[in-house]
Amino acid sequence: MVLGTSSGAGKSLMTAALCRALKRRGEQPLPFKGQNMSNNAWVDGQGGEMAYSQALQAWAAGLEPCCAMNPVLLKPQGDSTSEVIHNGHSVGKARADTYYQEWFKPGWGAIRRGLDQLSSAHPQGRLVLEGAGSPVEVNLQHRDLTNLRLAQYLRARCLLVADIERGGVFAQIIGTLALLRPVERPLIQGLLVNRFRGRRSLFDEGVKWLEEHTGVPVLGVMPWLDEVFPPEDSLDLLERRPRKPEAELEIAVVRLPSLSNFSDLDPLEAEASVKLHWIRPGEPLGNPDAVVLPGSKQTLRDLQSLERCGLAQELQRYGATGGVVFGICGGMQMLGEVLDDPDGLEGGDQRSARGLGLLPLKTRFGGAKALRQRSSHSHWPTGSPLPISGFELHRGDTCAVSTGCQELCSDAGLGWCRDLVAGTYLHGVFDNGPWRRQWLNLLRQQRGLKPLSLDQPHHAEQREQLLERLADAFEAHVNLEPLLQR
């Protein structure tokens, strides 16, 4: 099990690295996070919803992601409430102040079902568990579903990860170990210091001090990695700064208050010619080459936020004067004319709202979620059909209210376009290399730049290369042997 001294210590990536290292050794790692809180989701092949970070770990393990790897997913909705996903399917809404009284037993049952499914499907596999946040939140320890309760239940060997980049790494480790209960302390089999900058030998005295004062071996010191890996949650976006000063295109991405599925933007982040500029409501839009409105967990509430701060009006002017605007899922719904929410699912103060009016669309929320992987052909932006794939994850239906726009795909209802404004329900659309380059070439044509080659693989190939480099660094700097004994 990979535990962390805090949220954001690097547990998710270290778990992915451990999965790939085990796979290289001929084992079958089985990634598992009992409970995750994230709006960055993935839909598996059976239509089950799970956290994207466990999907990434599944790819690192050489497996297809399945919701058994993340049996409890909490999707924050604002106002201290979260949608509760058990074993891939929505089962209700929870409030923070009553979550443990109402959802602890059902959650533990979902976790055990996930474990049983994984163990049955891969009886020779080795579970690689990821904790959540800190394992020693003393007010929550007695009801902690996914850290040391799970480690004790499975008798897991635990690796404690601390982030030296944040500062105070000695206090992080000593404090965490001091707050463990006596029965839990022996579970910690090793320490890992993450995100170290500079010459490794400068930390030799620190390693020696930690081992002397804790009695726990430091199994590794991971260097700072310059690669851009997917963040686990929206808090990590705060640490992303504008990169690539030589980039030829700037794409503004609206950082919605209830932002979801921001991993949709990772393929653009990986393009050498593109710089992403994340814009909060209240910040000026500027004059980017394109604007992307990503997914939202609370579409009406986020739309109202854009209106209150004036960014909605800026987006309307930008689109009306020939700017390139692309919306994904909730972002596409905002681009329409009308959004009806009779059951109050999307967080707005009203049951109906006017959209940005950049596409002649009407959305009505309600009914069961659309949860499925999709493959289709896109006829935009050039008219030449290109195969695209991804997944749907949304409530509600959208339709065109006039003849002023076209279907984006050969499959009706997946997206719409009008001139330079378009949107789709297809999460992962930018993963499709040729389609992504077609869209970027539309922007480059606007700027008089030479087109990029369309001969681009699916982003999954680039992700695979990143995972290989991550595992290379992990194996070079971490001694796994104490953790791998059966």
Image: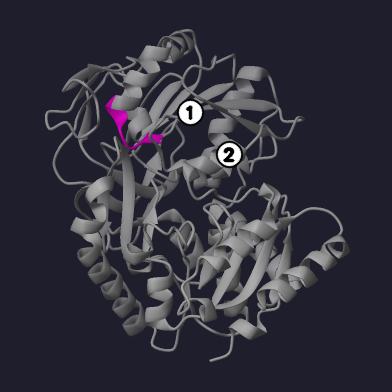
Q: Residue at x 38, y 56 (%)?
A: 139
The quarter of the displayed image where residue 302 is located = top left
Q: Is residue 337 left or right of residue 231?
A: left
- The residue type indicated by label 2 comes to Leu
Across and down, in percent, residue 264 comes to 47, 43
Which stretch appears magenta?
295-300
**SS for tag 2?**
helix
Determine whether 455 is above or below 203 in the image. Answer: above
Categorize mark 1 by other alpha carbons within 10 Å: few (<14), some (14-19), many (20+). Answer: many
Vertical comparison of 462 with 262: above or below: below
Q: Give the labeled residue for mark 1.
A: 292
Residue 450 marker: none
Residue on which disc 2 sits: 268
Q: Is 147 or 292 nearer to us in this picture? A: 147
**Residue 350 included in the magenta stretch of the image:** no
Residue at the location (33% across, 37% down)?
297
Q: CA distance from mark 2 to mark 1?
A: 11 Å
